[in-house]
Amino acid sequence: MDLILRNARLAGDPAGLVDIGIEAGRIAVIEPDLSAEGETLDAAGRLVSPGFVETHLHLDKSCIMDRCRQARGDIKEAIAEVARVKAGFTAEDVYERGRRTIEKCMLQGTTHMRTQLEVDPGIGLRGFEGVRKLVEDFAFAIDIEICVFPQEGLLNNPGTDELMVEAMRSGAKVVGAAPYTDSDPHGQIERVFEIAREFDADIDMHLDFGADPSDLDLLKVCELAERYGRGGRVAIGHVTKLAYVPPERLEAIARRMRDAGVALTVLPSTDLFLMGREHDHGHSRGVTRAHEMVRHGVNCSLSTNNVLNPFTPFGDCSLIRMANLNANICHVGAASDLAECFSMVTTRAAKLMNLSDYGLEVGRSADLVVIDAESPQAAVAELSPVLCAFKRGRRTMTRVPAELHYPG
Ligand SMILES: [Zn+2]
């Protein structure tokens, strides 16, 4: 064996410890007391999980706080500041900031990512070029796929459609949307389904971002997912409007999404930061209750979205922290729901991205993390650190456990 992880505790199987043998970058065997030779790492009963999966992260506009004014910290200022600094982005600049964000993701055990990327006549393909080089240079640690989308609108912004198509031709794997900035939101959604059909691509849209649930674009998305036969290949992100619907309606909408094969990504940090501003006190949370959507049969992921920009001026790229934040603000207390919060940053996120080579099974790529916890729910509850990560069997990060120093 090239590597043996001994005494690993697997999620969902807390009873016994197993050894994981890795050969040629793949999981070759999982069994107790494996009799084999090779480089050995003792997990000492800690949780070993498949790597973390970011389904929604904006590399191109991450790490810009140092060039943005932050006088008021409100949304008006955020929109104005991001528009101002975006005009100055170059491919090299996007690469350099994206590199810092990817390195943070590596330190948190992320092994797969879908990155949302803006094209429009203002930025052209400069962001795309910077991120495409990151995809190549960091393939040793994280599989990154690009989801290209029109942040400034599509039908109202001539030239954007051609740039999206060109990015799809040049290697973008997923097509996205932000219909709430378009003069014709449903027209944009329909056009995105056409592009997805043309390139046989998955779809991942920013959708239903707001506090008024009277009008939901997701119903249009469900209808088109069925009409275009793309069930299982469509995800929608934010969908904060569902935080403002009562349980019976939430269940009916969830069933609709489940039947149409539309998955949901909740972005707890951004949603919590940007929503709930309609009152000057007694703020609502504005974060859709993903664990309840899961109970109704919708596949869900939790993801980071923005890192250190005025729309989310925070970010350590820890998906365990995101799962914990989500659990805390959505009143997740049941052990099984806490475990689901962990699966929404691992296996459920991988399913949303249709990653066929992911998982702790013999034959799959050895993309693994060792976490200083005994169970997924403990990792979420205690914000347990990732101690090491492996991509295709090669170690990509190591964190030394903290030590206490008692007197004497
Ligand atoms: Zn986003």
Image (spheres, rainbow, N blue to C red):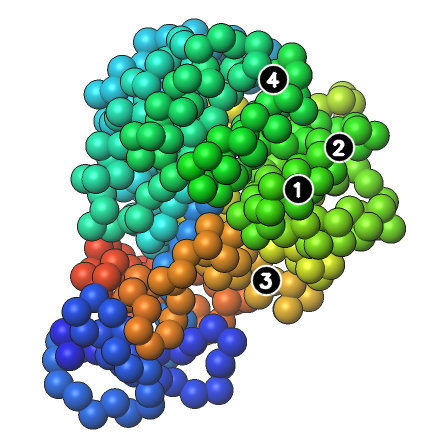
Label 4 sits on residue: 181
* Residue at x 38% of width, y 85% of height: 17
Type of residue at label 1? Arg
Element on which disc 1 rests: helix
Residue 1 relative to residue 97: left or right: left
Per the model, the C-alpha gap separating discs 1 and 2 is 18 Å
Return the x and y of residue 100 as percentages of the image width and height. 28, 34
Residue 381 point in image, percent of width and height: 55, 60
Front position in the image: 294 or 260: 260
Q: Is mark 1 within 8 Å of ligand 1?
A: no
For the image, the number of numbered tags is 4
The three-letter amino acid code for the residue at tag 3 is Glu
Residue closest to the eye, 165 or 38 = 165
Mark with earlier residue (1, 3): 1
**Secondary element type, mark 3:** helix
Coordinates of residue 329 in the picture (x, y in percent): 66, 46
Task: Check the picture and name the quadrant holding the C terminus.
Answer: bottom left
- Residue under label 1, please give it: 227
